[in-house]
């Protein structure tokens, strides 16, 4: 897989679900404390809630809907179910996008 | 407890993730033999139903609120956790748990099942909506799944009542084989690592036993492409809401019929009974008071028909999704949309349905602003004043001025609720906010029987309230307005000499700055029992025969006695005033403290006074 180039010690920002756009597909890489945006829940609590509703490492996802205002909240197809959440919380879900992960990052940075 | 005494009633709890068809399963199992504790709603309060298993065991089934984990966050989920763990006051843990799963979406619920297993109660897994799974071609190796999970599995289709006998037979089996009560397991909150470990286990089981669908459901995706579309989705939502409020007015003829029925009864009593306090108690107190509330049953049931159908369709979660950003701007949670919507019927079910909101602060904010939504009890008051003071002109050929004022009052209520929520969020609970995290279930056709049951339940709950809270309040108000009796031959209405009259006169100086006469102040007192009672009270004060019912005549009297400025101030007062003791009582119960009803009363009273003051003086300045 091309994403193997992204080793743990690389300082590159990893794509998060919070930054993904409609149509993005891939695999949940890490549901974790870091990467979340301020103002939300305590990170470990958020982590457990995301896990409980189905955001678990290895789950396949596809971002299928975006809200009107600020493209927020988002609806994510997650394996056999669909979950709605805000981008703020989605930011603590690190993802591995299908295809060239790096390419998608450039596309995001260009915006 | 394992000693099977013939008379022992077993307790079986239904547990499952939201949207797995648990309530439908409960209905299929227990039919009409259900008992709802208190008067709370469908999935928010503990529901219980009795049945007898094929082996003749009497069983009480508990329908518990949906949850993803025993690690409870919302009051709803706390009920589930405490019921499962036997921590509820005066109750032991259930003898068996039926874990209900949506067969098309097993991952999350199988993890919950593994968590439930650690509680140590016998479990039966009901694979519900199995017909949909079959239709989608999801291949589930049942024997293998059963042996890997270590719990008996039954397939069910609750909406068609399929698999119920089989399920009960399994329940019999686990109840029979359960020997010594298991040593009380010290259940502890799973950590993130525990949750992950359970998922790994789930994943292993799913890989071995379940093959993904051959014909996945594409309809939900197709509908969502329109219904969740950023623009079309919002437009459709507004059309749905508009239709819903229109529908509420379609049942007006039925309401009129009921009003006529109560009038007729009053008239019969008046005709056949000697005048006196008993007659007055029956007609003025009980029939006109409680009757004026009961006539709202058709409207409330219509509103709930819409809400329940939309919920069963799976649309409510979409509405919350679409509204989240707008609500979030006001500091409310997307899920607050449903409670606030219910509040248009009556703030009481609205406040109770705020239990679906996980976070305490989000829930309190929702509860505090819910009474600002224009409930159906304000309609009679608004109608009376509007017809008395707003000419029946038509603007641009199709917009009635009266309708416009009515819409304005609704609009003011909504905007002020959002503003108050915003202020509460900014001033009191800065920073932290609850995540919006909810499943969007697949669309399903609502089952007419389940819908009917839900609507009837709402009607019953409301009627029960009318029979208890409102009846007792009406009796109190009637007593205040009738005692002491007016001296014989006294000029003016009897209420003038009563305690209510005295209070009205005492309040007069307070209400003078907002343009209220003492009669208006008097009417506000009975209006505390229920808003719409103010209409009847105004009738009594102005000594109009059958004032409460014959709004046409009362309108004329009011138009004669009040200035337009006073009337507008009265309307403004009614948008905000906490004129409903029952609401405050429910807030007390839901928040379990006097603090919040007091805060609610204070802020609403302040807003009401300020709004009436400004309205009166602005209108006065314009010569009204």
Image: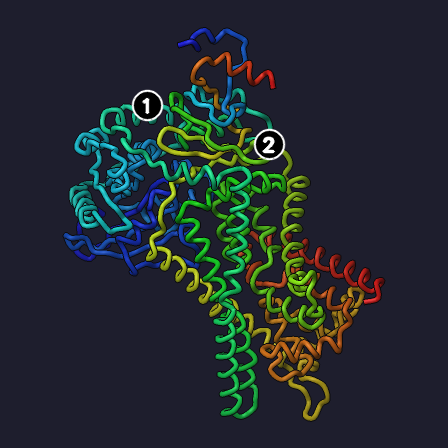
Q: Is residue B14 left or right of residue B391?
A: left
Query: Residue A60 appears at what percent x and percent y?
Result: 39, 24
Which residue is at 66% across, 51% downward? B416
Q: Inspect this view and state whether residue B334 appears.
A: no
In the image, B79 versus B526, the foreground residue is B526
Chain under disc 2: A
CA gap, disc 1 and disc 2: 35 Å
Q: Which residue is mark 2?
A: A70
Q: Secondary structure at mark 2?
A: loop
Position in image of residue A3 (x %, y %): 44, 10
Residue B321's mark?
A: none
Residue behind mark 1: B200
Which quadrant holds residue B36? bottom left
Quarter of the image that includes the C terminus of chain B: bottom right
Q: Helix, strand or loop at disc 1?
A: helix
The correct choice, above or below, for B145 with respect to B313 in the image is above
């Amino acid at each position: 897989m091309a994403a193997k180039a992204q080793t743990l010690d690389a300082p590159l920002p990893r794509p998060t679900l919070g930054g993904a756009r409609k149509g993005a597909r891939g695999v949940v890489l890490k549901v974790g404390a870091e990467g979340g945006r301020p103002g939300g829940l305590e990170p470990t609590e958020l982590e457990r809630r995301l896990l409980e509703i189905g955001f678990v490492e290895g789950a396949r996802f596809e971002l299928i809907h975006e809200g009107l205002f600020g493209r927020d909240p988002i609806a994510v197809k997650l394996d056999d179910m669909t979950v709605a959440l805000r981008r703020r919380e989605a930011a603590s879900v690190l993802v591995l996008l299908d295809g060239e992960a790096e390419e998608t990052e450039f596309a995001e940075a260009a915006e | 407890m394992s000693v099977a005494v013939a008379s022992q009633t077993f307790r079986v709890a239904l547990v499952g993730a939201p949207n797995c068809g648990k309530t439908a399963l409960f209905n299929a199992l227990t039919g009409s033999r259900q008992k709802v504790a208190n008067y709370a709603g469908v999935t928010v309060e503990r529901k219980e139903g009795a049945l007898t298993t094929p082996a003749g065991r009497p069983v009480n089934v508990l329908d518990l609120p949906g949850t993803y984990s025993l690690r409870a966050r919302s009051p709803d989920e706390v009920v589930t956790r405490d019921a499962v763990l036997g921590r509820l006051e005066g109750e032991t843990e259930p003898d068996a748990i039926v874990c209900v799963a949506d067969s098309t979406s097993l991952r999350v619920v199988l993890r919950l099942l593994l968590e439930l297993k650690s509680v140590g109660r016998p479990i039966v897994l009901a694979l519900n909506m199995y017909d949909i799974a079959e239709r989608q071609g999801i291949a589930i190796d049942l024997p293998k799944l059963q042996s890997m999970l270590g719990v008996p599995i039954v397939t069910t289709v609750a909406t068609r009542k399929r698999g119920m006998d089989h399920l009960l037979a399994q329940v019999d089996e686990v109840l029979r084989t359960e020997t010594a009560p298991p040593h009380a397991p010290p259940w502890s909150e799973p950590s993130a690592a525990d949750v992950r470990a359970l998922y790994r286990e789930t994943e292993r089981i799913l890989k071995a036993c379940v093959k993904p669908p051959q014909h996945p459901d594409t309809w939900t995706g197709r509908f969502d492409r329109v219904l969740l579309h950023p623009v079309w989705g919002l437009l459709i939502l507004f059309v749905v809401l508009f239709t819903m409020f229109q529908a509420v007015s379609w049942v007006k003829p039925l309401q009129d019929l009921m009003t006529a029925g109560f009038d007729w009864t009053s008239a019969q009593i008046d005709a056949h009974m000697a005048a006196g306090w008993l007659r007055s108690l029956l007609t003025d107190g009980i029939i006109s008071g409680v009757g004026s509330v009961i006539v709202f049953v058709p409207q409330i049931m219509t509103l709930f028909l819409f809400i329940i159908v939309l919920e069963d369709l799976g649309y409510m979660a979409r509405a919350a999704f679409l509204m989240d950003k707008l609500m979030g701007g006001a500091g409310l949670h997307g899920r607050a949309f449903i409670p606030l919507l219910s509040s248009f019927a009556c703030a009481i079910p609205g406040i109770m349905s705020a239990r679906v909101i996980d976070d305490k602060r989000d829930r309190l904010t929702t509860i505090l602003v819910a009474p600002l939504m224009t409930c159906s009890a304000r309609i009679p008051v608004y109608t009376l004043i509007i017809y008395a003071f707003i000419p029946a002109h038509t603007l641009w050929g199709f917009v009635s001025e009266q309708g416009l004022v009515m819409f304005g009052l609704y609009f003011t209520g909504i905007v002020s609720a959002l503003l108050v929520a915003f202020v509460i969020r900014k001033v009191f609970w800065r920073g932290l906010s609850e995540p919006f995290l909810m499943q969007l279930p697949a669309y399903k056709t609502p089952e007419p029987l389940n819908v009917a049951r839900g609507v009837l339940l709402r009607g019953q709950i409301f009627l029960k309230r009318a029979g208890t809270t409102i009846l007792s309040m009406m009796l109190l108000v009637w007593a205040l307005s009738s005692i002491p009796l007016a001296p014989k031959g006294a000029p003016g209405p009897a209420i003038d000499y009563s305690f209510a009259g005295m209070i009205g006169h005492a309040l007069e100086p307070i209400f003078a700055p907002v343009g209220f006469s003492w009669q208006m102040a008097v009417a506000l007192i009975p209006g505390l029992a229920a808003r719409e009672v103010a209409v009847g009270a105004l009738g009594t004060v102005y000594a109009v025969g059958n004032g409460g019912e014959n709004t046409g005549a009362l309108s004329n009297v009011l138009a004669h006695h009040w200035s337009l400025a006073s009337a507008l101030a009265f309307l403004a007062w009614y948008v905000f005033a906490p004129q409903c003791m029952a609401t405050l009582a429910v807030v007390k119960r839901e928040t379990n403290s006097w603090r919040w009803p007091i805060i609610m009363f204070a802020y609403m009273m302040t807003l009401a006074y300020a709004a009436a003051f400004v309205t009166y003086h602005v209108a006065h300045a314009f010569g009204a």
